[in-house]
Amino acid sequence: MAEVAFKKSTVREYFESLVITVILALFGTTFIVQAFKIPTPSMEDNLLVGDHLLVNKFVFGARGSVLDPVLPFKDIKHGDVIVFRYPKDLSKHYVKRAIGLPGDHIKIVDKQVYVNDVALNEPYKIHKSPPGSYADPFRDYFPPKPHPGRIYRGIDDDPYWYEEYVKDGEIVVPPNHYFAMGDNRDNSADSRYWGFVPRELIVGKGLIIYWSYETDSDEYRRTDVEDRVQQITDLFTNFFRKTRWTRTFKIIR
């Protein structure tokens, strides 16, 4: 009887340990950290397609608690790499850089970003448009200047989303909203095209790249069974060769 009781106790301990582990994992991914992967080149060369990162969900935590003064919450700062739910489709997550904070006045002149009349020093940004390519009114100059007979269209066929926020040729970021841009300025669908990021949609701050695997953005769009099998086969076959080892545990800045 003692042996049976011991076995039952051991099984129960394993079960309780498993339950606690699951609860801690769920708590951690809900409130502390969460894993994401980069499917597009909009944050190159800082974040590459195939980078897998951990996001600190705690750092910008919910406000209004009596514990706020003693908890290590931080405000979102200029230049922070933020992860947020895409305002046009909440099922998607975007990774961009916080360029404008509430109340900021922003304009872009010949690809140079100005915040409150100060030109930003952005060592992380790149421009990959071919020399001599046409000037894009959203990409290179923002907000677009009115032009007779020309309609500037953003995402979702909303040509004038920015108009109500323009003052003296600059965009004014409304309260509790942020203006986000990708580091790959010539290849990023960001706030220039679809608007501001509401504070409540910001999930957290990019923390660290825990794994990076060489791939292309089209792979993430191929989601049927055959494509998934090919991706898994590629992973098993080329794990060591296509893993970008030098990016492992790289701090996101």
Image: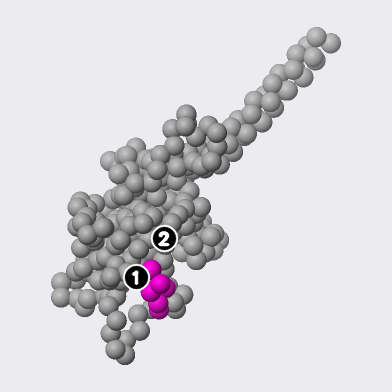
Q: Quadrant of residue 152?
A: bottom left
Label 2: which secondary element = loop
Label 1: which secondary element = strand
| Left or right of 194 on screen, residue 79 | left
Where does the magenta region start and end?
159-165
Residue that extends furthest to the right in the rendered view of this protein: 1
Quadrant of the rendering where the N terminus is positioned:
top right
Residue that extends furthest to the front in the rendered view of this protein: 168
Q: Is residue 38 above or below residue 72?
A: below
Q: Is residue 34 above or below residue 144?
A: above
78 in the magenta segment: no
Bin the neighbour count of mark 1 within 10 Å (Cα to Cα): few under 14, some 14-19, many 20 and up.
some
Bin the neighbour count of mark 2 within 10 Å (Cα to Cα): few under 14, some 14-19, many 20 and up.
some
Q: Amino acid at mark 1?
A: Val
Q: Amino acid at mark 2?
A: Pro
Q: Quadrant of residue 143?
A: bottom left
Q: Residue at x 64, y 29 (%)?
A: 20
Q: Position of residue 155 (x, y in %)?
A: 42, 73
Q: Position of residue 13 (x, y in %)?
A: 69, 21
Q: Residue at x 28, y 41 (%)?
A: 246
Q: Residue at x 27, y 78 (%)?
A: 145
- Mark 2 in CB contact with mark 1 (< 8 angstroms): no
Q: Is residue 31 above or below residue 185?
A: above
Question: Residue at label 1?
Answer: 166
Question: Residue at label 2?
Answer: 174
Q: Earlier in the sequence, mark 2 or mark 1?
A: 1
| Left or right of 25 on screen, residue 134 | left
